[in-house]
Image (cartoon, rainbow, N blue to C red):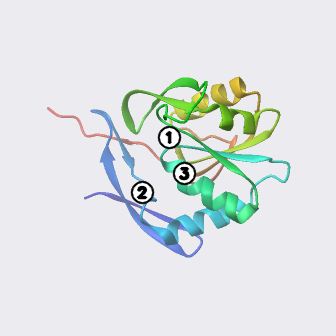
């Protein structure tokens, strides 16, 4: 199997390169179950977190680990944009999202209490990988509807196009799939 080597601090990993469509493959960054990599990534990102950030926001599911650990390290509150409405959500804010790593259209959702925690606040968004920008666009719409302002975007990696507006630790290329004759 083809792999892509990465390093974050002293932590090194070989990421499997997997197809996400007929034409494109990606180096698949998996944080769940890898405490050492999550800790290295959040420590490095905590050093780059802007001082004026009030709240950290992560999208379900990859952003959950990162938002929690970054909030813990930075001493700031965090919220999670969920992928579906939960029974405890009163007056949820919902926006559609399409990302390279997930087939079809999903949605991101904030309950009324989470939206209130973002209102009038400066938000740092954190996610595993920023690739097509679909999740970021959805988070921007969600935060805007909640009355907050995204002042920083953090990611373990960017992928595909360079994204100078994203504070990241790595940049991963997209890999063309070989033509099937």
Which residue is the site of mark 3? 64
> SS class of the residue under badge 1?
loop
130 or 162: nearer the viewer: 130
Q: Using the rendered view, name the quadrant where residue 74 is placed.
A: bottom right
Estimate the x, y position of residue 125 in percent, counting from the top left: 66, 43
Task: Find residue 160 and name its label.
Answer: 1
Q: Which mark is residue 30?
A: 2
13 sits to left or right of 170: left
Q: Which mark is residue 97?
A: none
Is residue 76 depicted above or below 97 in this figure? below
**Which of the pair 91/143 is nearer the observer?**
91
Q: Nearer the viewer, mark 3 or mark 1?
A: 3
Quarter of the image that includes the N terminus: bottom left
Number of the front mark, 2 or 1: 2
Left or right: 6 as drawn, with respect to 68: left
| Real-space Cα separation, disc 3 to disc 1, in angstroms | 23 Å
Q: Is residue 60 visible?
A: yes
x and y percent of residue 147 in the render? 76, 27
Labels 3 and 2: the sequence-earlier one:
2
Residue for point 62% across, 53% down: 67
- Expressed as whole percent of the image width and height from the top left, the position of residue 104 reads 36, 26
Q: Position of residue 139 (x, y in %)?
A: 61, 32
């Amino acid at each position: 199997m083809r792999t892509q080597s990465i390093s974050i601090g002293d932590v090194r990993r070989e990421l499997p390169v997997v197809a996400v469509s007929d034409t494109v493959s990606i180096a698949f960054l998996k944080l769940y179950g890898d405490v050492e990599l999550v800790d290295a990534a959040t420590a490095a990102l905590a050093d780059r977190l802007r001082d004026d950030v009030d709240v950290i926001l992560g999208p379900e599911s990859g952003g959950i680990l990162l938002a929690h650990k970054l909030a813990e390290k930075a001493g700031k509150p965090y919220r999670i944009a969920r992928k579906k409405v939960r029974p405890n959500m009163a007056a949820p804010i919902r926006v559609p999202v399409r990302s390279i790593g997930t087939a079809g259209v999903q949605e991101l959702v904030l309950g009324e209490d989470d939206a209130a925690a973002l209102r009038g606040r400066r938000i740092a968004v954190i996610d595993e990988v920023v690739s097509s920008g679909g999740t970021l666009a959805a988070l921007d719409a969600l935060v805007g509807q909640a009355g907050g302002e995204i002042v920083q975007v953090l990611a373990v990696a960017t992928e595909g196009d360079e994204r100078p507006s994203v504070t990241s630790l790595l940049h991963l290329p997209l890999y063309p799939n070989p033509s099937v004759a």
